[in-house]
């Protein structure tokens, strides 16, 4: 009697497990069956926000369901990323990841709240935004090599503008100084606009900042561009050479991609990545990103994971070189 009861119970449990697996498989096969949310841990109107909306609009078309953007800004991106990290891993919540929110912000905390590589599923990257190295036109510098030599000769007087401690412009400049072995006084400002304006006004000598913030000044002659942060030449930036042609190995650009909560099924990630690839192949998406000073940056989920692993290691080194301590 007991043996029969045990056998029946085992059979029931097996049937329930099979039904659950079948139900999960069916849900994955029919994904997405409703609207997908994309959390953006940046303020509305920011560069990351604008790029995410360009991608979200066409990603929804590729998925067959709308993708709506929800801004959760604050604390350098920590608030939005943590909200995404704790969301249900069913494919209906995506996080727009960037180096600021995924790498820099958590590394500036004593207790790192999440790991960009270990705590998420990686859908894929979609954009890279180069930083442009600019100098005031009165500075007798027309190349990266000349800036390095001028800075070494005028160590006591040359200074660099940054958008604030821990900002992309701060870290990209520190990395250049570290790799090229020269020094400049770093002058922090409250944001990218004020830091660029200080170089335009001649209050500071040079800065390294995202392309959209400086290219209008370069085109009207109020700033001189001498290099950019991509490791290769860029059609978008014309004749401006990569810093890496002078300082071998230099590479510190902004980027954006999509991640999902840990545990999101592999089949769902595969569907999302396929839809992202279709989206990035569209001319209007490429053009839209280009207007934001960005190039399409794509690869497989595994490519994105490996990229994050390397960029995380690089960011740790730069933060140490900048003598930044976790708060």
Image: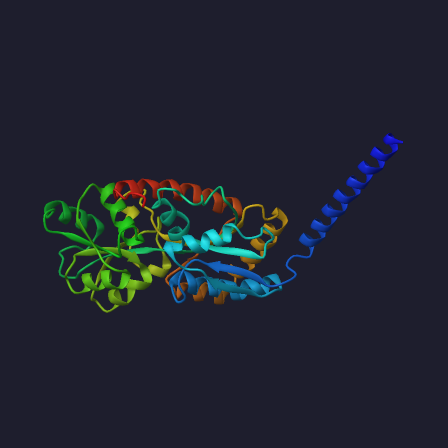
Q: Residue furthest top?
A: 3
Q: Residue furthest front?
A: 2
Camera sees residue 171: yes
Instruction: Name the side, left or right, on which 298 lies relative to 231.
Output: right
**Which residue is found at the position 30% from the left and 53% from the top?**
167
The number of discs equals 0
**Which residue is found at the position 54% from the left and 53% from the top?**
87
The foreground one among 233 and 92 is 92
- What's the coloring here? rainbow
Camera sees residue 297: no
Instruction: Name the side, left or right, on which 45 lies relative to 120.
Output: left
Q: Position of residue 86 (x, y in %)?
A: 52, 50
Q: Residue furthest right?
A: 1
User: Can you tell which quarter of the image residue 43 is in?
Assistant: bottom left
Q: Is residue 293 above or below residue 313?
A: below
Quarter of the image where the N terminus is located: top right
Q: Position of residue 242 (x, y in %)?
A: 30, 51
User: Can you tell which quarter of the image residue 30 is in?
Assistant: bottom right
Q: Position of residue 148 (x, y in %)?
A: 18, 47
The foreground one among 182 and 90 is 90
Q: Position of residue 245 (x, y in %)?
A: 29, 47
């Amino acid at each position: 009697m007991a043996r029969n009861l045990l056998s029946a119970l085992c059979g029931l449990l097996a049937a329930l497990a099979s039904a659950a697996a079948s139900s999960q498989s069916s849900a994955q096969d029919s994904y997405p069956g409703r609207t997908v949310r994309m959390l953006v841990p940046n303020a509305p109107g920011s560069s990351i926000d604008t790029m995410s909306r360009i991608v979200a609009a066409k990603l929804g078309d590729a998925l067959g369901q709308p993708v709506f953007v929800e801004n959760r800004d604050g604390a350098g991106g920590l608030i939005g990323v943590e909200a995404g990290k704790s969301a249900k891993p069913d494919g209906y919540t995506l996080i727009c990841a960037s180096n600021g929110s995924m790498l820099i912000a958590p590394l500036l905390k004593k207790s790192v709240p999440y790991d960009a590589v270990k705590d998420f599923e990686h859908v894929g990257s979609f954009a890279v935004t180069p930083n442009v190295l600019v100098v005031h036109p009165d500075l007798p510098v027309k190349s990266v090599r000349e800036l390095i030599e001028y800075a070494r000769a005028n160590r006591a007087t040359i200074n660099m503008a940054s958008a604030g401690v821990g900002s992309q412009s701060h870290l990209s400049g520190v990395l250049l100084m570290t790799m090229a072995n020269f020094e400049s006084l770093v002058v922090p400002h409250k944001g990218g606009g004020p830091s660029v304006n200080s170089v335009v006004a001649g209050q500071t000598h040079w800065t390294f900042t995202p392309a959209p913030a400086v290219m209008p000044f370069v085109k009207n002659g109020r700033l001189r561009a001498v290099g950019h942060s991509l490791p290769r030449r860029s059609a978008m930036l014309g004749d401006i050479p990569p810093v890496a042609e002078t300082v071998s190995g230099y590479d510190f650009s902004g980027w954006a991609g999509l991640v999902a909560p840990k545990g999101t099924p592999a089949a769902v990630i595969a569907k999302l990545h396929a839809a992202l690839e279709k989206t990035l192949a569209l001319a209007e998406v490429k053009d839209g990103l280009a207007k934001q000073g960005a190039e399409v940056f794509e690869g497989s989920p595994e490519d994105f994971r490996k990229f994050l692993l390397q960029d995380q290691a690089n960011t740790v080194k730069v933060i140490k070189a900048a003598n930044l301590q976790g708060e």
